[in-house]
């Protein structure tokens, strides 16, 4: 069984991803929102990720650019609507390759029995947008991203 679980209810505009990490919530939240760590874990390994902007505050903007080994670029951006450290983040998410399809992401961090449960609920503008995201291979990319995040957390906890 994969460590990253998904709930994809039929006919709804949402995807819920859940993953448990063996680390205190404060440390998980700090690593998740640290712009210097994002390139080490965000996205598939085959891409390099550059943080163009990351202002983790209400109204702050974020933008990441990924580059493939062939030099293709893929950019993503959004705005932070709520930062309640270390419990919750609410932000928008847009793939610049499909402008105008802006989703809302609600990420919660719950401490439970010495672990942190990360729940990420992505709400899409339509069921079609959600289904298109799933068809693009989102699950595999998200699993790899969370596996990489777990690796980064292990390094951070050793310091």
Image: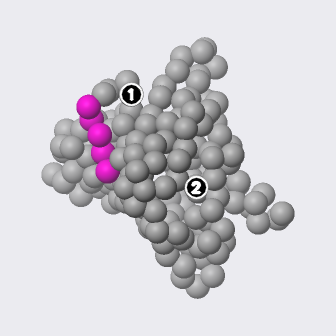
Q: Residue at x 37, y 24 (%)?
A: 97
What secondary structure do most residues of the magenta stretch adopt?
loop
Q: Quote the CA–CA distance across marks 1 and 2.
A: 21 Å
Reply yes or no: does residue 103 show up in magenta. yes
Q: Which residues are magenta?
A: 100-104
Find numbered disc 2 in the image and state the secondary structure of the residue it sits on: loop
Of 123 and 69, the residue lying toward us:
123
Of 6 and 40, the residue lying toward us:
40
Residue 1 visible, this angle: no
Measured along the vertical axis of the image, is residue 12 above or below residue 96?
Answer: below
Circle 1/circle 2 CB separation < 8 Å:
no
Of 5 and 58, the residue lying toward us:
58
Residue 2 visible, this angle: yes
Residue 121 occupies which quadrant of the picture?
A: bottom left
Task: Residue 34: give x, y in percent of width and height.
Answer: 63, 53
Q: Residue at x 59, y 37 (%)?
A: 51
Question: Residue under circle 1?
Answer: 96
Colour basis:
one colour
Question: Residue under circle 2?
Answer: 33
Task: Residue 103: give x, y in percent of width and height.
Answer: 30, 45
């Amino acid at each position: 069984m994969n460590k990253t679980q998904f709930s994809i209810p039929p006919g709804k505009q949402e995807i819920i991803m859940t993953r448990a990490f063996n680390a205190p919530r404060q440390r998980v939240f700090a690593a998740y929102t640290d712009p210097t760590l994002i390139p080490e874990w965000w996205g598939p390994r085959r891409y390099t990720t550059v943080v163009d902007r990351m202002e983790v505050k209400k109204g702050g903007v974020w933008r990441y650019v990924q580059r493939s080994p062939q030099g293709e670029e893929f950019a993503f951006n959004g705005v932070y609507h709520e930062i309640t450290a270390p419990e919750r983040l609410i932000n928008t998410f847009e793939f610049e390759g499909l402008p105008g399809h802006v989703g809302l992401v609600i990420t919660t961090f719950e401490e439970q029995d010495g672990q942190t449960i990360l729940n990420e609920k992505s709400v899409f503008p339509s069921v079609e947008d959600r289904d298109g995201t799933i068809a693009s291979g989102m699950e595999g990319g998200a699993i790899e991203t969370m596996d990489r995040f777990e690796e980064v957390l292990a390094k951070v906890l050793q310091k």
